[in-house]
Image (cartoon, helix red, strand yellow):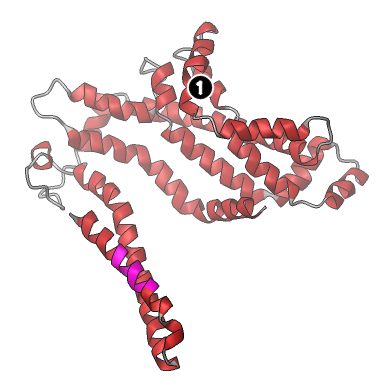
């Protein structure tokens, strides 16, 4: 219901904004100022409405994690807990090895991020500053990889991982995710914006190719590097389908799969404990939310610079 109202308000706001723009040339200066104020107000209303629509699922998840299972399953949902159930969070830690899930996710995400950044930087240097035959053709192949849905590759990759004995292991989770065509593209665009004179100056100072990358290109493209690092971390933390395929043991299970496992753990109880499942989901998203709030300006800067190259 709330989503419907906010969506309707957003649509009305955009319609009024469009009408005011079409009439702007037909009215006096004083009226234009008033219309400008109305336009600004409508923009704020639309922004607030869209924000509410986007944040309401998160709000619902948080308050659901603080309710009793009985209150959560009431026919008429409540927008605020009648009584805060803080014990839902320690209950999750007792019923499932959730801390182990978090540790596994942190380990795999870190190595995936490191691999995607390092290999992406090396590949981007070759595609942007290297001179070799077939460079453009190979880069077209990289761009072509962006058009292939990743789910299509899961079965052949799983077969290869299974044959080398990496099922239920960290290498099975990490190695297939060490390269990102999208990050190679972003870094190539960033490196191409660096003038070759900087590289020539570095060569005069005796820098090798690795030295040029580390001391010239990476510092000058730091916003893009930070952006892809953050995006890689978020993608690794939220990864679900591949960990679900390649891992069947709690010793290597990640947090995204672990939250789903909470439902299976509670399935034998008389009342479905969706409140505890929501508590597990809240604990799972806290690191990502904090990371995004702290580093969001770097994400926006890096994405905008890559788009303008």
Main secondary structure along the magenta-highlighted residues:
helix
The answer to which of 9 and 58 lies nearer the viewer is: 9
Helix, strand or loop for disc 1: helix
Q: Quadrant of the N terminus?
A: bottom left
Whether residue 273 sits left or right of residue 7 in the image: it is: left
Q: Position of residue 53 (x, y in %)?
A: 29, 55
Tell me where residue 97 sits by quadrant: top left
The stretch of residues the image draws in magenta is 10-18
The residue tagged 1 is 153
Is residue 99 visible in the rendered image? The answer is no
Is residue 304 highlighted in magenta? no
Is residue 14 covered in magenta? yes
x and y percentages locating residue 76 in the rendered image:
7, 47
- Seen from the viewer's position, the closer of residues 212 and 309 is 309
Seen at 29% across and 58% down, the residue is 52
- Residue 51: image x %, image y %? 34, 58
Q: Is residue 211 above or below residue 296?
A: above
Give the total of numbered labels: 1
The crowding category of the residue bearing disc 1, from other C-alpha atoms within 10 Å (few below 14, some 14 to 19, many at least 20), is few
Examine the rendered structure and indicate whether residue 119 appears above or below residue 48.
Answer: above
């Amino acid at each position: 219901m709330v989503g419907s109202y906010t969506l309707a308000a957003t649509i009305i706001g955009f319609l009024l904004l469009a009408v005011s723009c079409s009439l702007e040339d037909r009215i006096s200066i004083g009226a234009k100022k008033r219309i400008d104020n109305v336009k600004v107000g409508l923009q704020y209303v639309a922004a607030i409405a869209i924000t509410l629509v986007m944040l309401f699922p998160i709000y619902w998840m948080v308050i659901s994690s603080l309710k009793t299972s009985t209150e959560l399953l009431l026919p008429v949902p409540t927008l605020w807990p009648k009584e805060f159930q803080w014990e839902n969070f320690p209950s999750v830690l007792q019923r499932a090895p959730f801390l182990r899930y978090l540790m596994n996710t942190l380990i795999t995400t870190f190595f995936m991020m490191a691999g995607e950044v390092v290999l992406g930087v090396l590949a981007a240097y070759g595609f942007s500053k290297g001179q070799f035959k077939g460079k453009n053709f190979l880069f077209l192949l990289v761009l072509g990889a962006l058009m292939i849905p990743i789910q299509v590759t899961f079965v052949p990759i799983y077969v290869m991982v299974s044959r080398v004995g990496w099922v239920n292991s960290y290498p099975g989770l990490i190695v297939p995710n060490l390269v990102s065509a999208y990050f190679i593209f972003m870094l190539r665009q960033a490196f191409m914006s660096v003038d070759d004179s900087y590289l020539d100056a570095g060569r005069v100072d005796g820098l090798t190719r690795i030295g040029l990358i580390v001391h010239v290109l990476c510092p000058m493209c730091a916003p893009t590097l930070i952006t892809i690092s953050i995006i890689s971390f978020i993608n690794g933390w939220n990864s679900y389908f591949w960990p679900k395929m390649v891992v069947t043991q709690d010793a290597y299970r990640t947090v995204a799969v672990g939250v789903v496992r909470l439902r299976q753990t509670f399935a034998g109880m008389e009342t479905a404990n969706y409140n505890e499942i929501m508590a597990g989901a809240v604990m799972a998203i806290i690191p990502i939310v904090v990371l995004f709030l702290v580093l969001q300006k770097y994400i926006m800067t890096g994405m905008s610079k890559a788009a303008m190259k």
